[in-house]
Amino acid sequence: MTLTERVSEEMKIAMKSGERLKLETLRTLRAHLVELTKRGSGKPVTPDDEIAAVMGEMKKRKEAIELYEKGGRLDLAEQETRELAILKAYLPAQMTAEEAAARVEQVIAETGSSSPRDLGKVMGILMKELKGRVDGKALQDIVRTKLGG
């Protein structure tokens, strides 16, 4: 079952059970996923594309939370936080910080990286491999620390 199919099924369940917030969140995500299929490139939507769509929606929520908190709108920040939690369920299992740090060390050793200038090379490899399984900013912080930056 693709992510798009899973979202559609869970939308039906949310509709029947009266979970408005979940339904609206899933509708937004489904619209983004449908948009991917109609992008006109002729290529089928891959699981990586679907994960990128979920991550994009999550990024929007994180930015909104930050802005609402700065503006003193804690009620809206709380709603965005709940939407973010709903979206997290559609990502692959997340790595722990320790697992991510171990993989960072392996990639640094494999590439022979030794200075902060090698950040891009290491991050490029890690982001392809760990897409959706770890937060990019947290991963970048780990790589910077390990490379002495």
Image (cartoon, rainbow, N blue to C red):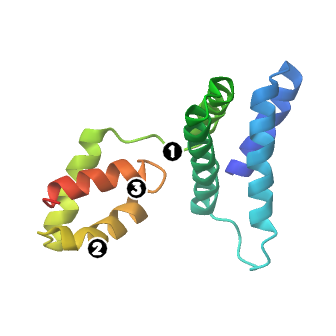
Residue at left 34%, top 62%? 126
Q: Are marks 3 and 2 in contact (CB under 8 Å)?
A: no
Under mark 2, the amino acid is Lys
Nearest the viewer among 28 and 68 is: 68
Residue 125 placement: quadrant? bottom left
Q: Is residue 3 left or right of residue 105?
A: right
Which is nearer the N-term, disc 2 or disc 1?
1
Decide if residue 81 is in sight here.
yes
Residue at left 85%, top 20%? 18
Q: Is disc 3 surrounded by few (<14), some (14 to 19) or many (20+) residues within 10 Å?
A: some
Image quadrant in which the C terminus is located: bottom left
Image height of 14 relative to 47, above or below:
above
Under mark 3, the amino acid is Leu
Q: Which mark is residue 130?
A: 3
For the view shown, which residue lies furthest in the right direction?
A: 16
Residue at left 58%, top 54%? 51
Q: Dot 2 corresponds to which residue?
A: 121
Q: Residue 142 at what x, y percent from top left?
A: 25, 51
Decide if residue 1 is in sight here.
no
Q: Is residue 131 left or right of residue 53?
A: left
Element carrying mark 1: loop
Q: Is disc 1 surrounded by few (<14), some (14 to 19) or many (20+) residues within 10 Å?
A: few
Which is nearer the N-term, disc 1 or disc 3?
1
Under mark 1, the amino acid is Pro
Q: Dot 1 corresponds to which residue?
A: 92
Q: Residue 114 at what x, y percent from top left?
A: 11, 69
